[in-house]
Image (cartoon, rainbow, N blue to C red):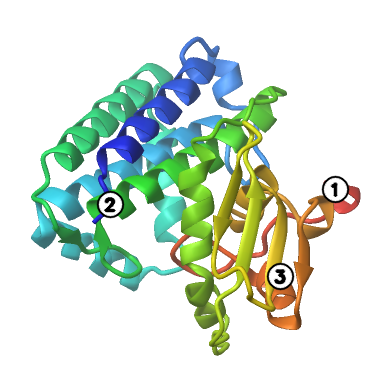
Amino acid sequence: MADPMPVIDDLCAESDELDSLVAELSPEQWKLVTPAPGWTVAHQIAHLAWTDHAALLAVTDQGAFSREVEKALAAPGDFVDNGAEEGAGKPPARLLAYWRAGREDLADALRTAPEGARFPWYGPPMSTASMATARLMETWAHGLDVADALGVTRTPTDRLSHIARLGVRTRDYSFGVHGLTPPFEEFRIELTAPSGELWVYGPENATGRVTGPALDFCLLVTHRAHRTDLALRTEGADADRWLDIAQAFAGPPGSGRPPKGEAG
């Protein structure tokens, strides 16, 4: 059983890094548009705060979380945008305080969760480590959107290891959400970490292979870059197909990002 504490620590570090980007923004900067259509910097932080709150309910009050799922099922195309819109309407100071308090409460709840616990979610149920990993993935991905709006380049860290692992583990989910049967054979994935370390998943003799920078793989599975703009290489038709549909997040695939030459 995976020890959840390292990923919870990395979740907190990722959140703190994003916090440092937005803590001193002017009211005008909170209104800057991000790559997500219709979303400003405020919408991005509001979404993180909203999802942290949902995760906290999943961990501490599953009855209340079930009611949130019912709301989502009643408005499947709007509930995410509605949550972001509501939070983005708050004054920046209130939104920032709400996000900070919520993510601290979630981290505390995850640290004290019973060993072996599993929590409901909008996708499959998750363990403590998986819940923390999913929150880290979203915090990193939406943090990239904020950084893009601010014209800031963030330095990748080896905290990406959690996101890369999640991207690998959601391979079959990616096929399923597109109505496709997952390949029977595991793939071999070899990713070069920001530190230069090699992260390896899957059997060495697999015929389907993916290699390249871990950053690019994480950008791909979070739909923060188009495949054609990334230095990822494949061997085997199934592995190649996977990179066209890979996603590490629950829910519909969405349209993703266009190639850089087509952006805007």
Q: Which residue is denoted by mark 1 in the rendering?
A: 260
State the image coordinates of residue 61 (x, y, percent, origin top left). Answer: 10, 53
Decide: few, some or many residues near mark 3? Use Cα within 10 Å; few <14, some 14-19, many ≥20. some
Q: Residue 92: x percent and y percent?
A: 42, 21
Name the kind of residue labelled 1 in the image: Lys
The structure residue drawn at horizontal position 50% and vertical position 77%, both measured from the top left corner, is: 172
Contact, mark 2 vs mark 3 (Cβ under 8 Å): no
Q: Secondary structure at mark 2?
A: loop
Badge 1: how crowded within 10 Å, few (<14), some, or many (20+)? few
Q: How many marks?
A: 3
Above or below: residue 225 compared with residue 34: below
Q: Which mark is residue 244?
A: 3
Give the residue at x 50% y 44%.
161
> 80 or 207: which is nearer to us?
207
Residue 160: where, in percent of width, then height? 53, 41
Q: With respect to residue 210, does 90 lie above or below?
A: above
**Which residue position is annotated with label 2?**
2
From the viewer's perspective, is 128 left or right of 232?
left
Residue 123, given in percent of the width and then of the height, sits at: 35, 68
> Which of the two discs, 1 and 2, labels the residue nearer the N terminus?
2
Give, as a three-letter code, the residue at label 2.
Answer: Ala
Question: Which tag, 2 or 3, sits closer to the chain's start?
Answer: 2
Residue 37 visible, this orientation: no
Q: Secondary structure at mark 1?
A: helix
Query: Where is 209 relative to 155, above or below?
Result: below
